[in-house]
Image (cartoon, rainbow, N blue to C red):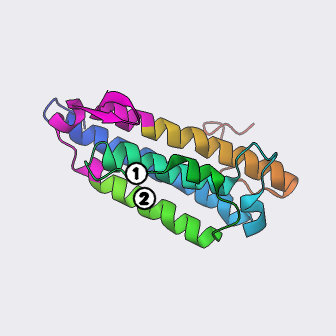
Amino acid sequence: MMATPDRLHRTVGTEACVELDSALQIIRHCVDQLSDVQLWWRPAESMNSVANLILHLCGNVRQWVISGVGEAVDVRERQKEFDQRNSALKAELMQQLESTVADAKVVLSDVSVEGLLRVRRVQGSDVTGMQAIFHSVSHFRGHTQEIVHMTRFQLGDSYKFDFIPTTTEEGAL
């Protein structure tokens, strides 16, 4: 169905939800293969663990979508997302990420045209609701790929792919 101008805001919200759900599924696939120790492993002290990236994604989505677009109070303490070490089990982290995405989907499913166009201040920048959504969803996707890379790096040949093409249309040889 083609989005008409009077439905475009709903389409934007719906597609943002689809992207968050898709990325969340990939993160879950990776986390399910990692132990709690591997989840908190850092390639170097100055780099983030998968767990820190999950905390960071929660903070970003809460700040940009739930607070920025949904107008909830912004209580983010960004540096804490990176400073934490071995303080939560993977089940707790995934529950937090899934809850954050669910809260964001409520905001996105109800975003109005005015909500997409209104300028608000998020993380020191004046952005429209549309900009906040695009920022957060693309940020989520970017760190999802980082999580995939870190998982594959740790697991090597024992990494289990979620998708393996079986037809030429899907990319199989």
Q: Which of these two is toward me, 151 or 38?
A: 38
Amino acid type shown at disc 1 = Arg
Residue 133 visible? The answer is yes
Q: Is residue 111 magenta?
A: yes
- The residue to which callout 1 is attached is 62
Which residue range is magenta in the image?
Answer: 107-135
> Closest to the observer: 120 or 132?
120
Where disc 2 sits, the SS reads helix
Q: Residues within 10 Å of mark 1 (few under 14, many from 20)?
A: many
* Residue type, label 2: Thr
* Quarter holding residue 123: top left
Q: Position of residue 63 (x, y in %)?
A: 39, 46
Number of marks drawn: 2
Front disc: 1 or 2? 1
Residue denoted by label 2: 100
Decide if residue 152 is on the left or right side of residue 146: right
